[in-house]
């Protein structure tokens, strides 16, 4: 579900229809031991680990799915809580606030109603939103959860179509009981430039951009398409999209395709500038109603189209250098094959 999503009251007593047989599984998190999840045995579990150099130690993306009574999905990424500044409840709330601002843009609600999540070894918070879109192919409800366990914070997305079914409550119960096992502390590589990294769905290449102080908030897979969203408290936001090409052509063809879509959008763009070349084409514009500077960067790689959208609210002229540096840092790296 690309768009964000509605606060639904969770009535756990009503959802508890009887004991559910559970399965337990541990997931490796490089440099941080393992996280252990306990979930209904009928749920399907998959793990996507982006191919990368051994010393990069990217976190896994864990997906749990169910079709029992309704289509339902949970996606989570364990991240070092120290790097996310989420070691305190204040820091965790700031992390949630950043994501909520973006989620609310596609929701029927105008405010995220935070709920506490407390367990023996984990704690956090969550909110639920309703997708404003009526597209039957999308999930109707989304719950975002942020859970601290050991020295990790789990960035979680729960998607469902019926809050009256038990899955959402079961997913939140799973998060209450999550455990970290055998955590190890390893220093970060000195001098290395941190980057946001999105692995293509075919596993053959990665899309990268300098991270700066952006926090990765959400990563989703839709068939052969992948998306990632990141933002910070200063009003900077980045959305990365990798999807199969609609037709042959270079970066300018990609831009022309999406420009045609944007012209049909009710959003008013001003100060429109097209630049770049066949390898990296750009569209720069201002949305004065939102007081927001925007740029889309388009590329093509291995029959996949790439669209990186960078925006900054309350943009100042002296921030142009940072914008240019972010655009310049966008690049593609072939994935390193596993031996």
Image (cartoon, rainbow, N blue to C red):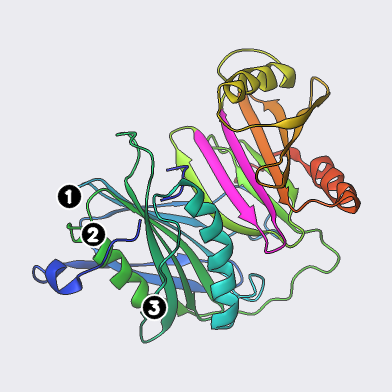
Instruction: Please tell me whether mark 1 or mark 3 is closer to you in this view.
Output: 3
Closer-to-camera residue (14/78): 14
Residue 46: % across, % down: 39, 51
Q: Which percent across, then down, holds residue 166?
A: 19, 61
In the rendered image, the residue lying farthest to the bottom is: 120
How far, Cα to Cα, is label 1 from label 2? 9 Å
Secondary structure at badge 1 equals: loop
Which circle, 3 or 2, is nearer the viewer? 3
Residue 230 within the segment the image draws in magenta? yes
Which image quarter is the N terminus in? Answer: top left
Q: Earlier in the sequence, mark 1 or mark 2?
A: 1
- Residue under the point 68% across and 64% down: 233
Residue 216 disc label: none
Q: Is residue 139 found left or right of 207 in the rendered image? A: left
Q: Which residue is mark 2?
A: 167
Q: Nearer the viewer, residue 59 or 25?
A: 59
* Image-based side of 287 in relation to 129, left or right: right
Work out how far the residue at label 1 is from the one at label 3, CA to CA, in angstroms. 27 Å
Residue 59's image quarter?
Answer: bottom right
> Horizontal placement of 183 versus 250: left or right?
left
Which residue in the protein does label 1 denote? Answer: 68
Query: Would residue 20 be seen by someone viewing this image from the given angle?
Result: no
The range drawn in magenta is 225-243
In the rendered image, residue 67 lying in the magenta stretch gets the answer no
């Amino acid at each position: 579900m690309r768009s964000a999503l509605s606060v639904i009251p969770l009535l756990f007593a009503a959802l508890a229809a009887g004991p559910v047989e559970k399965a337990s599984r541990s997931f490796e998190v490089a440099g941080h031991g393992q996280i252990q999840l306990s979930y209904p045995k009928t749920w399907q579990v998959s793990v996507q680990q982006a191919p990368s150099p051994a010393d990069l130690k990217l976190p896994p993306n864990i997906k749990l799915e169910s079709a029992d009574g309704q289509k339902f999905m949970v996606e989570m990424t364990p991240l070092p809580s120290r790097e996310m500044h989420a070691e305190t409840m204040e820091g965790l709330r700031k992390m949630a606030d950043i994501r909520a601002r973006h989620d609310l843009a596609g929701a029927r609600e105008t405010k995220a109603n935070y709920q506490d999540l407390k367990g023996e070894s984990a704690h956090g918070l969550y909110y639920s939103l309703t997708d404003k879109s009526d597209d039957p192919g999308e999930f109707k409800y989304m719950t975002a959860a942020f859970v601290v366990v050991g020295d990790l914070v789990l960035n979680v997305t729960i998607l469902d179509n019926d809050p009256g079914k038990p899955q959402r409550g079961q997913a939140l119960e799973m998060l209450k009981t999550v455990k970290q096992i055998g955590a190890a502390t390893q220093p970060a590589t000195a001098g290395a430039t941190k980057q946001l990294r999105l692995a293509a769905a075919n596993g053959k290449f990665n899309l990268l951009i300098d991270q700066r102080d952006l926090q990765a908030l959400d990563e989703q897979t839709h068939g052969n398409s992948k998306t990632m969203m990141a933002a910070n408290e200063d009003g900077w936001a980045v959305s990365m999209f990798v999807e199969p090409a609609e037709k042959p052509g270079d970066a300018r063809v990609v831009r022309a395709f999406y420009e045609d879509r944007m012209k049909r959008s009710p959003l008013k763009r001003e100060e429109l500038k097209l630049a770049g070349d066949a390898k990296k084409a750009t569209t720069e514009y201002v949305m004065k109603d939102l007081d927001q500077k925007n740029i889309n960067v388009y590329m093509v790689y291995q029959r996949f189209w790439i669209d990186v959208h960078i925006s900054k609210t309350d943009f100042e002229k002296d921030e142009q250098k940072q914008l240019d540096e972010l655009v310049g840092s966008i690049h593609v790296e072939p994935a390193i094959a596993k031996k």
